[in-house]
Image (cartoon, rainbow, N blue to C red):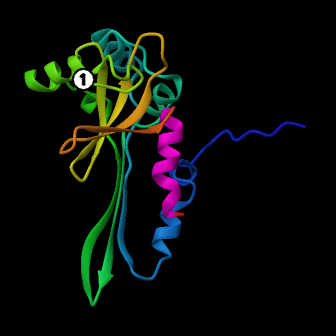
């Protein structure tokens, strides 16, 4: 017995992508203005061009994500005493926004000095390739290629304290982690 779906509607695609988070938000009494930006897929040539330009291969899960949808944006507001306040924003930038981040000369020099302390943590040194996936309240989320022999992971960099936090081993885990707490 086999089962397949030959047509996936746009609504069901986003429902599956977000694991039902949009409906949960829409059914919450104080949540208003739930908006999901619907985007087209990236062209395969654009993916190959990105990889050639940056001399690195996107992880398979991230490549599949961009092959389905060029970025992701979900926003919502809370209504308190009749007034709406924007409180929620889940975002993965478009492929064209996935640019290499290089710190200032001072940050790079500091990173080079500290790289020997813990080579498993990303740094702003030129040896580490960092691509900004999103931002969060004074911090940045990076797809981090720490070393050529390691798979890239997703890390949060807190700029004011110059501190790195490991978020996920893969893009899929990060995306699920990003959407699951809402549900």
- Residue at (62, 42) in percent of width and height: 7
**Residue 132 point in image, percent of width and height:** 28, 33
Residue 14 horizontal side relative to residue 118, left or right: right
The overriding secondary structure of the stretch rendered in magenta is helix
Q: Is 47 contained in the magenta span?
A: no
Q: Is residue 5 above or below residue 15?
A: above
**Residue 3 point in image, percent of width and height:** 80, 40
Q: Which residues are magenta?
A: 170-182
109 or 135, which is in the foreground? 109
Q: Residues within 10 Å of mark 1 (few under 14, many from 20)?
A: some
Q: Quadrant of the C terminus?
A: bottom right
Q: Dividing the picture into quarters, in which one does residue 71 lie? A: top left
42 or 114, which is in the foreground? 114
Q: Secondary structure at mark 1?
A: loop
Q: Is 181 contained in the magenta span?
A: yes
Q: Is residue 44 above or below residue 167?
A: above
Q: Dividing the picture into quarters, in which one does residue 104 lie? A: top left
């Amino acid at each position: 017995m086999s089962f397949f779906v030959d047509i996936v509607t746009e609504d069901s695609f986003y429902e599956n992508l977000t694991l039902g988070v949009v409906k949960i938000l829409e059914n919450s009494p104080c949540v208003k203005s739930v908006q999901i930006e619907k985007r087209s897929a990236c062209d395969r040539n654009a993916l190959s061009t990105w990889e050639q330009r940056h001399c690195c291969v996107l992880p398979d899960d991230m490549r599949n994500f961009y092959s389905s949808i060029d970025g992701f944006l979900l926003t919502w507001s809370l209504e308190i005493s009749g007034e709406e306040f924007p409180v929620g924003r889940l975002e993965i930038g478009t492929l064209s926004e996935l640019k290499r981040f290089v710190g200032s000369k001072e940050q790079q020099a500091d990173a080079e000095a500290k790289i020997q302390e813990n080579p498993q943590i990303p740094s702003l040194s030129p040896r580490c390739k960092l691509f900004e996936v999103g931002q969060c309240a004074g911090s940045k989320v990076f797809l981090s290629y720490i070393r050529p022999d390691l798979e890239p992971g997703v890390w949060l960099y807190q700029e004011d304290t110059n501190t790195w936090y490991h978020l996920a081993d893969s893009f899929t885990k990060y995306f699920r982690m990003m959407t699951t707490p809402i549900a």
